[in-house]
Image (tube, rainbow, N blue to C red):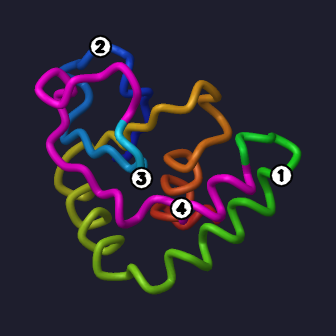
Amino acid sequence: MILTKRIYAPRSQRDGKRILVDRLWPRGIKKEDAAIDEWLKEIAPSDVLRKWFDHDPAKWPEFKQKYKKELRGKTEILERIRNEAEKRRITLLFSARDVEHNNAAALKDILEGNE
């Protein structure tokens, strides 16, 4: 099972393994307080794509397609996450305010084969 959650939300037992999937460290969070198990910045959208998207919901469908293309070279990491998610709950952490239109939501869809 794969969930998504803002890193600013309190940690929960329900989270399982917590993986930060942002390229940049979230503002206002100390690394020792983040309660993450892993930071996979290498699977975050490129800086160019992230800046182009700018969390604009109108660009969401195109962002997801472009992000999926960027992830084509990261199959090993994606398979590892899928395999872990089959064994236990995984929570993809993100810092964006928009809980529906962010890289973690897009990554979840891609990992689950919904994209």
Residue 59: give its label: 1
Under mark 4, the amino acid is: Pro
Give the foreground label among 2 and 3: 3
Residue 74 falls left or right of residue 15: right
Q: Residues within 10 Å of mark 2 (few under 14, many from 20)?
A: few
Under mark 2, the amino acid is: Pro
Q: Where on the picture, by quarter, is residue 68? A: bottom right
Residue 14, percent from left and from top:
25, 25
State the SS at label 2: loop
Instruction: Point out the tag, 4 or 2, that comes first from the N-terminus.
Output: 2
Residue 72 falls left or right of residue 7: right
Q: Which residue is mark 4?
A: 45
State the SS at label 3: loop
Residue drawn 24% across the image and 70% down it = 80
Q: Is residue 43 above or below residue 23?
A: below
Instruction: Point out the tag, 3 or 4, that comes first from the N-terminus.
Output: 3
Q: Residues within 10 Å of mark 3 (few under 14, many from 20)?
A: some
Q: Which residue is mark 3?
A: 23
* Highlighted magenta segment, given as a residue range: 26-53
Q: Which residue is mark 2?
A: 10
Q: Nearer the viewer, residue 113 or 75?
A: 75
Instruction: Point out the tag, 2 or 3, that comes first from the N-terminus.
Output: 2
Q: Are marks 3 and 4 in contact (CB under 8 Å)?
A: yes
Residue drawn 40% across the image and 26% down it = 27
Residue drawn 19% across the image and 41% down it = 17
